[in-house]
Amino acid sequence: MVELKTNTSIDAMHAAGQVLARALTAVRQAADVGVSLLELDEVARGVLREAGADSPFLGYRPSFAPTPFPAVICASVNDAIVHGIPTAYRLRDGDLVSIDCGARLDGWASDSAISFTVGRPRPADVRLIETAERALAAGIEAAVVGNRIGDIAHAIGTVCRGAGYGIPDGFGGHGIGRQMHEDPSVPNEGRPHRGMRLRHGMVLAIEPMLIAGGTDGYHAAPDGWTLKTNDGSRAAHAEHTVAITEDGPRVLTDRG
Ligand code: MG
Ligand code: MG
């Protein structure tokens, strides 16, 4: 069931989203060659704590997971697509990092992700990240009243496939509100004009995931959480929490 949010609730979700935006900006600023993923998790924890927010990631345990998630960020490096557990791994020159984070404030959740490189970037990674951001922007642009879920999916998929990248099947965006994951699901590929009609008050996490090698296959790493590409190529992830309003899409996790 899809819960429509009031304008007051959307404002409250925006406040949560702005804490999250600050956390991601701080993580990105801290990330550099030699910095560990655990240190980045600590940076995000500090921003949430300072704001009086808590983490919808910490302790989260969906049905596929062998253990509760132990951190407030997912840190997915190089061939890891999403759900990477922060470890003592220290970032190396040219690594491609995706950071996914959530913040819950006054009971309202937000969810957002960024991808970036550290040290000297590979041109192929720059193109991959730019395409992820372009796919996210296209998905957001399609998130308007009167469109359907399939229009968002189609917009994202067209950008990803058009650039020759793969799309991990079965993972994508979702409704969000008091719970981090609510109905409906928002696939990263689909047919236009199909699926649920978009209405004022729907809030969606839109999140393209791209596989550089152009194949769609992935598998779970031995930790049971981290999803890695089957072809060993690198992956990128970009995500915003977006409210659908009569005035157009409102990006609640905008980093300014
Ligand atoms: Mg996320
Ligand atoms: Mg999400």
Image: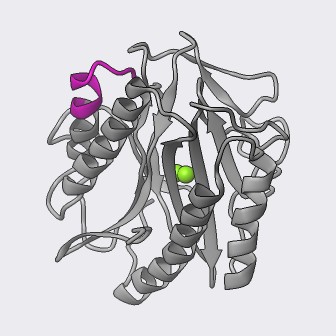
How far across and down, in percent of the image, does residue 30 sit? 65, 58
- Residue at 75% x, 56% y is 41
Work out whether 63 lies above or below 143.
Answer: above
Q: Looking at the picture, how far across and down is residue 255, in whole percent?
A: 42, 68
Q: In this view, does 92 lie above or below 68?
A: above
Q: Residue furthest top?
A: 231
Q: Residue at x 50, y 82 (%)?
A: 15
Tell me what residue is drawn at x 82 percent, y 41 percent.
87
Q: Looking at the rendering, which quadrant does residue 122 occupy?
A: top left
Judged left or right of residue 176, residue 105 is: right
Q: Which residue is drawn at 74% across and 47% down?
A: 35
Picture quarter containing residue 195? top left
In the image, 63: left or right of 111? right
Question: Is residue 104 magenta-colored?
Answer: no
Q: Can residue 195 be seen in this view?
A: no
Residue 165 lies within the magenta run: yes
How far from the left and from the top, in percent, is residue 27?
63, 59
Task: Specify whether residue 119 is in view.
Answer: yes
| Residue placed furthest toward the bottom | 8
The span picked out in magenta is 158-166
